[in-house]
Image (cartoon, grey):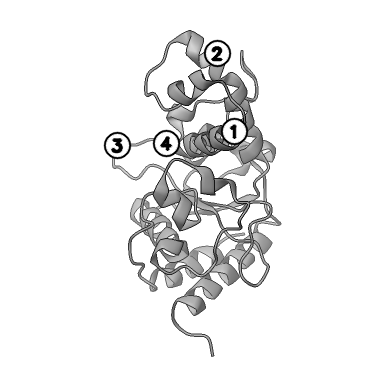
């Protein structure tokens, strides 16, 4: 019988499989709208070509929102920041300074594709002028296209403390830096990101990848999944 971390990982993925069924399938951000999204929750991204040891899809990013008492950010607001712009003056672009997920994907694309040298500097700069933002548009669009191709799902979670616990423990459970069993593929784009923690965790996450997880959180996640749909 499988025990320990492997058993916890298997249980985690069984719960996500139930969530997929209750949600009537995985989504992509380009297909989502504010009316289809719960006001508060935790999200899970998968990625084409990234699989578990058993061949099923593995989670590559976990995230949530509004973890401070004063934050009014909704789940949809956060997901829109990751998705990027649909219309406007730079359709398909985005703002990686408002989404660490976009920032990480951008650094990996910079390392694997031929981009102007100026972009390597501006992308990593916190403040840039209008001309630099205009020059960044092709890369922002490439980031949007990459994230748009990633299947995802969410789990509605209204309580701030529970959102934090589900995000934190899911990342800690999945992280290859602390014993996660499902390694990224050799071709995984994240292997080229700036962050060494990201490259070695197998996740588009940096926070919580070196922390232990509390397996009892899976009971909480199970209750959330069972209440979905």
Nearer the camera: disc 4 or disc 1? 1
Tag of residue 143: 1
Query: Image point 45% across, 76% down: which residue?
Result: 5
State which quadrant residue 166 falls in: bottom left
At a point 57% along the width and 68% down the height, the residue shown is 13
Between discs 3 and 1, the one toward the N terminus: 3
Which residue is the site of mark 2? 134
Which residue lies under the disc numbered 4? 73
* Residue 38 visible to the viewer: no
Disc 3 element = loop
Question: Which is more foreground, mark 2 or mark 3?
Answer: 2
Dot 2 or dot 3: first in sequence order is 3
In three-dimensional space, the C-alpha distance between marks 4 and 1, rounded to whole angstroms, equals 22 Å
Name the residue at the left extreme: 69
| Marks 1 and 2, how far apart at CA | 15 Å
Q: Say whether marks 2 and 3 touch (CB < 8 Å).
A: no
Quadrant of residue 121 in the image?
top left
Q: CA distance from mark 4 to mark 2?
A: 27 Å
Asked if residue 122 lies left or right of residue 17, the reply is left
Q: Which residue matches tag 3? A: 70
Q: CA distance from mark 3 to mark 4?
A: 9 Å
Tell me the mark number nearer the camera, choosing from 3 and 1: 1
Measuring from the top left, give residue 47's x and y in whole percent: 63, 51
Which mark lies nearer to you, 4 or 2? 2
């Amino acid at each position: 019988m499988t025990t320990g971390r492997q058993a916890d990982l298997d249980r985690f993925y069984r719960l996500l499989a139930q969530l997929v069924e209750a949600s009537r399938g995985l989504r992509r951000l380009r297909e989502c709208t504010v009316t289809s999204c719960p006001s508060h929750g935790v999200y899970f991204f998968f990625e084409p070509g990234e699989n578990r040891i058993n061949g099923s899809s593995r989670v590559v990013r976990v995230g949530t929102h509004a973890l401070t008492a004063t934050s009014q950010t909704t789940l949809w607001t956060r997901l829109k920041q990751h998705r990027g712009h649909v219309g406007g003056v730079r359709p398909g672009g985005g703002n990686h300074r408002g989404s660490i997920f976009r920032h990480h994907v951008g650094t990996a694309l910079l390392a694997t594709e031929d981009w102007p040298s100026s972009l390597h500097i501006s992308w990593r700069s916190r403040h840039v002028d209008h001309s630099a933002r205009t020059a960044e548009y092709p890369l922002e669009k490439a980031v949007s296209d990459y994230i748009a191709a990633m299947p995802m799902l969410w789990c509605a979670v209204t309580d701030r403390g529970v959102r934090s616990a589900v995000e934190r423990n899911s990342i800690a459970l999945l992280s290859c830096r602390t014993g996660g069993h499902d390694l990224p593929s050799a071709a995984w784009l994240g292997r080229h990101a700036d962050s060494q923690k990201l490259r070695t965790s197998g996740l588009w996450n940096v926070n919580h990848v070196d922390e232990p997880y509390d397996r009892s959180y899976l009971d909480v996640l199970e209750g959330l999944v069972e209440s979905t749909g």
